[in-house]
Image (cartoon, rainbow, N blue to C red):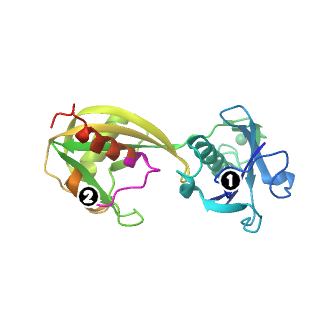
Amino acid sequence: MTYLCYCAGSILVTHDDHLPSGSRPPMPLQPWQVVTTIQDFRGNDCQVVRLSTPATDIQGYTMMELRHTFGRLSPQEYRLAGKGAELLYWDASTRYCGLCGSPTRWQTSISKQCTQCGKEMWPSPSVAIIVRVTRGQEILLVRARNFRGSHYGLVAGFVETGETLEESVHRELWEETRICIRHLRYFGSQPWPFPFGMMVGFTAEYESGTLQLQQSELSHGGWFTADHLPPIPDKASIARRLIDDWTDSLKSPHSHP
Ligand SMILES: [Zn+2]
């Protein structure tokens, strides 16, 4: 059994950077603290546990902010920790049925059902697009007003109801920067458990337009070359993967400037 023990955005990890596991939990647990039991990538059971106070005094363990476990936990354990955190958030936000207001109960390890009307509920993360736009040897980087710290990132935004992912990319770019793109390509996706999202990454080339930042959302932005990049997002993010992929491609002997 693996134990995914959360308290206020932090998770319990061992001092040698693993998730707690074994036949007994790292601390005594009440049944109501175990929100659900999911399976890891090997099919082993993992209890998702809500702690009422941080477990800071258990020898061999430490509480760590979920985001800081990236690069410390293995990629599989990091993803598992994110999944548990999303389920915990989803559990807290679906205590009552959205249709009739009655209490819900867990139906499977990853779904719930209304105790009165029977409505089934499955976790559905908020989907956002993120796009890397390049122009020759330059990349478009922007600084969102809601970014913590001083780093720059890529244009991103939530997908609206009724639009395709591609339409969402074009719309966000137009709203935030007034530029048009071509050669839009899918890059990859990444669950983003802060608190409950799915990032869908794209690449594109600049086509036309003069950069005009949307002042309400962006404080700075511009075209940057690889040797003069501002501070960029940390390695946990798909934004960083997109940027690193671009700088790597510039070093490759097969790249065409
Ligand atoms: Zn209901």
Residue with the mark numbered 2: 214
Taking depth in this image into account, of 211 and 149 the one nearest to the observer is: 149
Q: Is residue 158 magenta?
A: no
Asked whether residue 188 is in view, the answer is: yes
Between 183 and 42, which is closer to the camera in this rendering? 42
Q: Residues within 10 Å of mark 1 (few under 14, many from 20)?
A: few
Mark 1 and mark 2 in contact? Answer it, CB < 8 Å. Answer: no
> How many numbered marks have been drawn onto this rendered protein structure?
2
Magenta region, residue range: 229-240
The quadrant of the image that shows the C terminus is top left
Task: Give the labeled residue for mark 1.
Answer: 92
The x and y percentages for residue 218 are 30, 60
User: Does residue 104 appear in the picture of this structure?
Assistant: no
Query: Are there few (<14), some (14-19), or many (20+) residues within 10 Å of tag 2?
Result: some
Label placed on residue 41: none
Residue 223 sits above or below residue 204 on the image: below
Q: Amino acid at mark 2?
A: Gln
Residue 237 falls within the magenta-colored stretch:
yes
Q: Secondary structure at mark 2?
A: loop
Earlier along the polypeptide chain: callout 1 or callout 2? Answer: 1
Residue drawn at x 69%, y 36% as measured from the top left: 119
Element assignment for label 1: helix
Depicted 232 relative to depicted 138: above or below: below
Q: Ligand 1: does it lie within 8 Å of the C-beta at label 1?
A: no
